[in-house]
Image (tube, rainbow, N blue to C red):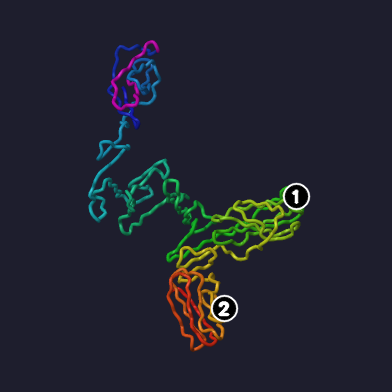
Amino acid sequence: RITARSSVGETLASTAGIATTGNAILSLTNFNRITWTAVFGAVDYRIYRTTAGGTPSTTGLIGTVTLLTFDDTGLVATTAVPTIDSSGNFGIGTATPNSLTQIIGTTDGEGPTFGGAGSILHLRQNAPWTGRQPWALFVDGYSWLGGFRIFGGGGPRALLQTVVGSPLGFATTGNDPIIFSQLETQERMRIASDGNIIIGATTPAMPATRLHVVGTTRGVGGAQILSLPTPGAPTVTPQGTTGTTTWGYRITARSSVGETLASTAGIATTGNAILSLTNFNRITWTAVFGAVDYRIYRTTAGGTPSTTGLIGTVTLLTFDDTGLVATTAVPTIDSSVNVGIGTMTPAVGNRLEVHDGHIVNTMTTPPGVTCNVGIPSIIGTDMGGAITTPATATACTITFTIPWNEIYACVVSGSTSTAAPFVSALSATAATFTYVTTGTPILYYFCSGR
């Protein structure tokens, strides 16, 4: 019997072709020649011996060829004749299915009851859930994501839970995480087996981190927190000729907005007494996620040089102290954190930026003040302060030199009855007030966002 094969499978076997005058023992000399008619679209054919009245006595597959003829010279038979036609794709609603099973339809649905009628494919499991796991649909695949894909046609509801009070659940077994990805390999978020949520990474930077976000996070209302963890203690390895001198180093990590506190000191007790290009200390450390670079501080100097402080800034994770000049002391304040309220982009250097119009702890520059005569004095910042004008001055101009972030207003008042309050709403730019006064007043001013 003959089967034809396509690129996807094999047909059922033909009706048997019979010869009753064959030799009792098949060989290269005495053999049976089988021929058949071509099947359109076939890529090759399989030949099955189904009746064996002599030697060999076995039945089954004896060959695969692309020709329309085959000689059985007593070949070994293997696989049995197929009982299922696997050569074609199965289609409903299409005459040219492109998959083993393809269903295409246009249905109207059945309204808002979510009963499932009018669907292209409707599966319903009536049995309650038990330990036997009576799935309504079980997909088992070996490709990435297990071979199960959903295409929503551009809509947001490729997967929709339709029954109120029945939550949409995702579950895995063992310690496997739930992963949300794009383009198969671009992981966006995962929920670990311990319930921790990780965004932008595959493991949290520290254990038991309930929410680990790589990158900038912004809260409702525009709150923003940018931070870096303090680096771990570095490893110090003397290079060249060693000795008995003690050297110590601490590392800080820097973000785009500031610098962390210094790590615990890394110590070497076998260093050379005089550091040089030949005899030096190599400092290495572990990366801090999100750091743009690192600073190295010499904190223990038992030989030459004897100075301590900043000796270098690098983007690598290794640094050689060849006797470098030390400058700035180790930082005592973590400046790597910026917090914004009312803004999603607190400026570099702004530890706390509050957008009711001004920047807290940042606008330290006082306004400019000039009077028609004499030189005034000022104590304050662009947000508030006091101006003492000359005794003979009759007009003073106050110029707020730093642009604000949004609309704001200022109040200017005097210490005498001749000085009246002054209020003005301005655009978010530098502003100028001209104040007319007599006598020797002290002008008090205060500015805030509107």
Q: Secondary structure at mark 1?
A: loop
Q: CA distance from mark 1 to mark 2?
A: 58 Å
Where, quadrant-wise, is the N terminus in this rendering? Answer: top left
- Above or below: residue 31 compared with residue 365: above
Q: Which residues are magenta?
A: 28-50
* Residue 139: x %, y % from top left: 37, 44
State the residue in front, 129 or 277: 277
List the residue tagged with mark 1.
242
List the residue tagged with mark 2.
379
In the image: residue 109, left or right of residue 449: left
Q: Secondary structure at mark 2?
A: strand
Inspect the image, locate mark 2, and give the three-letter code of the amino acid beneath it. Ile
State the residue in front, 17 or 386: 386
At label 2, counting other C-alpha atoms closer than 10 Å, the crowd grade (few under 14, some 14-19, many 20 or more) is few
Q: Nearer the viewer, mark 1 or mark 2?
A: 2
Inspect the image, locate mark 1, and give the three-letter code of the amino acid beneath it. Thr
* Residue 46: x %, y % from top left: 35, 24
State the residue in front, 92 or 450: 450
* Residue 434: x %, y % from top left: 48, 79
In the image: residue 432, left or right of residue 13: right
- Above or below: residue 434 compared with residue 216: below
Where, quadrant-wise, is the C terminus in this rendering? Answer: bottom left
